[in-house]
Amino acid sequence: MNRRDFLAVTAASAAAAQTAGQRLPMRKGIYWSMLPSKLSVEERFALAKECGFQSVECPTMDEPAQVEEVLAASRKTGLPVHSVMNRDHWKFPLSSADPAVVEKCVHGIETSIRNAKAWGADTVLLVPAVVNAETSYRDAWDRSTAQIRKLLPLARENRVMIGVEEVWNKFLLSPLEMAQYVDQFQSPWVRAYLDVGNMVLFGFPQDWIRTLGKRIVKVHLKDFAWRNYTIPGDPPQKKRVPEFVDLREGEIDWKAVHKAFLEIGYRGDATVELRGGDADYLKEVSRRVDLILEGA
């Protein structure tokens, strides 16, 4: 190794050591369904806080009494609702050719925006479209774009951003497409909701983070792995299945993710969206999020 290579390696090692000890400036969020359903709304908020979480993402709620109950629990525990996960975008996508289906989705988004306003949240999560045998990629793009444009006045009026998320919907399959999709609106009220685990089937989260950059308004934390299973038979068959797994037990390079988030300066919420469990389980999830945020 010559002197130049030595200095380069030394500098890279020093930079890695420095970033590894730098905690990401994110709030630890938890999704509502992870909290035991047997508990009251206030008890669920209190448990989230006890387990070390700093914010909550709630689903769309139709009943005014439900909305008030969440607001009261949030205020009493001091745990804010930071985002609303829209309810109807999978079953009733904006990309459908059926106006009745689209109407149901639009109603769900409008309700979500009003929920967010009531709770003091700044974002609504939206899966914008679903590509399937009936809906082409182009149709999914055009139809969803047209409907989101119609929703922008309500989003602007309530100061709530629409966070477009990438999922296993055969749509927005690269960070370049996601960036283009968001940018076409030329609006601060449409941003990217990045799920760190959802794109692992077809990409790398650190690449998505750097490409989307300041477009990212919220983050979901998941981990992902391929699991090998043997199906009994004569002869036995081997099957490789993609699965979401516990944080830091999958194939995501969390150090690379940590470094990418530092580079873009993301300072929002990072919400775990995993299976639910009791207090001991949730405390362990919280501990693992801390390790991710610290670059450990």
Image: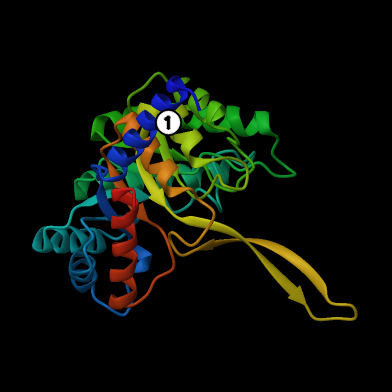
Q: Is residue 186 left or right of residue 35?
A: right
Residue 64 appears in which quarter of the rendering? Answer: bottom left
Using the rendered image of the protein, determine whether residue 215 is visible from the camera's viewpoint.
Answer: no
Query: Residue 153 at x, y = what percent?
Result: 33, 27
Q: Is residue 276 visible?
A: yes
**186 is higher (above) or lower (below) than 132:** above
Q: Residue 81 placed where, x, y %?
A: 23, 52
> Which residue in the structure is indicated by mark 1?
9
> What is the three-letter code of the residue carrying label 1?
Val
Q: Where does residue 50 sit, x and y in percent of width and height?
A: 18, 69
Report the label total.
1
Q: Residue at x 37, y 66 (%)?
A: 33
Q: Quadrant of residue 251?
A: bottom right
**Camera-side residue of 190 and 53:** 53
Q: Nearer the viewer, residue 201 or 68?
A: 201
Number of other residues with Cα within 10 Å of mark 1, as a class: few under 14, some 14 to 19, many 20 or more: few
What's the residue at 61%, 38% (across, down)? Answer: 171
| Element carrying mark 1 | helix
**Above or below: residue 49 compared with residue 161:** below
Could you say where residue 175 lies in the image, as x and y percent from the top left? 53, 31
Structure colour scheme: rainbow
Find the residue positioned furthest to the right: 234
> Residue at point 56% right, 27% down?
177
Q: Is residue 279 or residue 72 the one in the foreground?
A: 279
